[in-house]
Image (spheres, grey):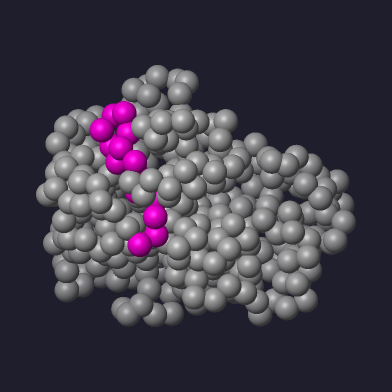
């Protein structure tokens, strides 16, 4: 098939369960120009090069033909730092990171270990006596959303509404055919606005009634980079909530699916839990929670693998393809929990690498270790492949039914 349709095929739901043959096709060409003028890059060295190239922008306003409907200043909201370039990106990211972890708050994540362990224990205890369990709804979703909710200081009773808004926002990122994209986008924008207003009001409350949470730190602990404006705080809180659980849900669920398909590997990890941190790194390579990043734009004509990508063209970095590049990883289609030299791109790379990675790693390690302890050798998948979420970007099962 022509390479000009690769992205269309990658985002086709029919290929959601196994997009990897399409990624292999992409790597054969290195760079693939699409019918809409965008460029896909899926080889490891080239993706890493672009992550660290100062000529590559994350700001959609630098597109030659920017889509006004998806620009950051939507409904009067400030852009999140993942959609900005330095120095503004550096300032906003620095303010967000200050209360989150090292070097300013080095104990924040490790202090959560006990809470995460208790949540995991409660969730797995609830499996007792059940003939069927959904790893997504019964385990992989409630764990990280509870943790990030606690970090942000969200009242537990508000999480249902926040989940509805999150679902609308994630659906708006769906590239597949079907519902009018403009309708999905508008619903996602409305949800983002409503969630931002919610966080603005909650931050106002925390200013008068501070607690040990991120919102209280944002409004009450100015650092060397200053403080957020109200609009910046609202946008950042929305980003932290969604990024703080959506990707971890996929990491845990994809991990459970991978291990259930490999009972020998599951038994090995059950017998040697010290191997789990290495296995989580391999999961981030083998089945990453984020498959591609569509929000990149060259600020000048650049050459990648012998192809000139013009200034302002949409650039899509296909991380899941790069993670299986045989020029970088030996036997890349094999899941190896003890793989060495595993410099995967599961958390990106460069200035926009995920600063929530330590929390995601901790949650995945504790979750998958406990899940293997709870599930016996006789546990099996009810449906394989399982039904997947519609999003090809945040790829993972929507449900993962098992019978313990």
- Tell me where residue 141 appears, x and y as whole percent: 59, 50
Asked whether, in this view, residue 299 is left or right of residue 77, the answer is left
Seen from the viewer's position, the closer of residues 229 and 329 is 329
Quarter of the figure with residue 74: top left
- Tell me where residue 239 appears, x and y as whole percent: 35, 51
Residue at the spot x=43%, y=49% of the render?
A: 27
Seen from the viewer's position, the closer of residues 365 and 33 is 33
Seen from the viewer's position, the closer of residues 266 and 237 is 266
Residue at the spot x=30%, y=37% of the render?
A: 33
Q: Is residue 307 above or below residue 281?
A: above
- Tell me where residue 101 appears, x and y as whole percent: 38, 73
Q: Taking the image as drawn, is residue 57 in sight?
A: no
Q: Taking the image as drawn, is residue 295 in sight?
A: yes
Q: Is residue 33 magenta?
A: yes
Q: Is residue 36 above or below residue 273?
A: above
Seen from the viewer's position, the closer of residues 364 and 63 is 63
Asked whether, in this view, residue 222 is left or right of residue 143, the answer is left
Q: Is residue 163 above or below residue 57?
A: above
The tally of labels here is 0
Asked whether, in this view, residue 306 is left or right of residue 357, the answer is left
Residue at the spot x=42%, y=44% of the render?
A: 26
- Start and end of the magenta stretch? 32-45
- Tell me where residue 13 appears, x and y as whole percent: 54, 31
């Amino acid at each position: 098939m022509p390479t000009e349709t690769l992205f269309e095929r990658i985002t086709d739901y029919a290929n959601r369960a196994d997009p990897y043959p399409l990624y292999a096709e992409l790597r054969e060409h290195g760079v693939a120009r699409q019918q809409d003028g965008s460029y896909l890059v899926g080889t490891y060295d080239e993706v890493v090069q672009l992550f660290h190239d100062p000529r590559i922008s994350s700001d959609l306003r630098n597109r030659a033909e920017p889509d006004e409907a998806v620009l950051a200043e939507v409904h009067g909201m400030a852009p999140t730092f993942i959609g900005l370039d330095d120095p503004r990106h550096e300032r906003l990211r620095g303010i967000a990171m200050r209360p989150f972890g090292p070097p300013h708050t080095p104990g924040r994540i490790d202090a959560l270990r006990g809470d995460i362990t208790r949540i995991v224990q409660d969730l797995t205890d609830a499996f007792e006596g059940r003939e069927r369990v959904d790893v997504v709804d019964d385990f992989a979703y409630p764990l990280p959303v509870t943790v990030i909710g606690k970090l942000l200081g969200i009242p537990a009773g508000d999480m249902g509404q926040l989940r509805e808004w999150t679902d609308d926002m994630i659906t708006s990122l769906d590239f597949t055919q079907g519902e009018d994209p403009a309708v999905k986008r508008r619903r996602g924008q409305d949800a983002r606005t409503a969630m931002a207003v919610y966080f603005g009001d909650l931050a106002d409350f925390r200013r008068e009634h501070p607690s040990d949470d991120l919102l209280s730190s944002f409004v009450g602990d100015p650092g060397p980079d200053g403080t957020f404006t109200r609009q910046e705080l609202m946008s950042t809180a929305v980003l932290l909530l969604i990024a703080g659980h959506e990707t971890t849900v996929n990491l845990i669920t994809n991990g459970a699916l991978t291990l259930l398909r490999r009972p020998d590997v599951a038994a090995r990890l059950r017998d040697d839990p010290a191997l789990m941190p290495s296995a989580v790194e391999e999961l981030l390579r083998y089945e990453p929670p984020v498959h591609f990043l569509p929000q990149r734009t060259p600020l000048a004509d650049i050459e990648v693998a012998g192809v000139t990508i013009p200034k302002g063209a949409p650039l899509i970095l296909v991380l899941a393809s790069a993670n299986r590049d045989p020029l970088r990883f030996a036997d890349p289609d094999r899941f190896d929990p003890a793989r060495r030299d595993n410099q995967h791109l599961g958390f990106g790379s460069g200035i926009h690498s995920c600063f929530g990675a330590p929390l995601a790693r901790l949650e995945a390690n504790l979750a998958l270790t406990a899940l293997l302890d709870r599930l016996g050798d006789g546990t099996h998948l009810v449906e394989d492949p399982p039904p997947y979420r519609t999003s090809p970007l945040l790829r993972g099962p929507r449900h993962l039914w098992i019978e313990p």
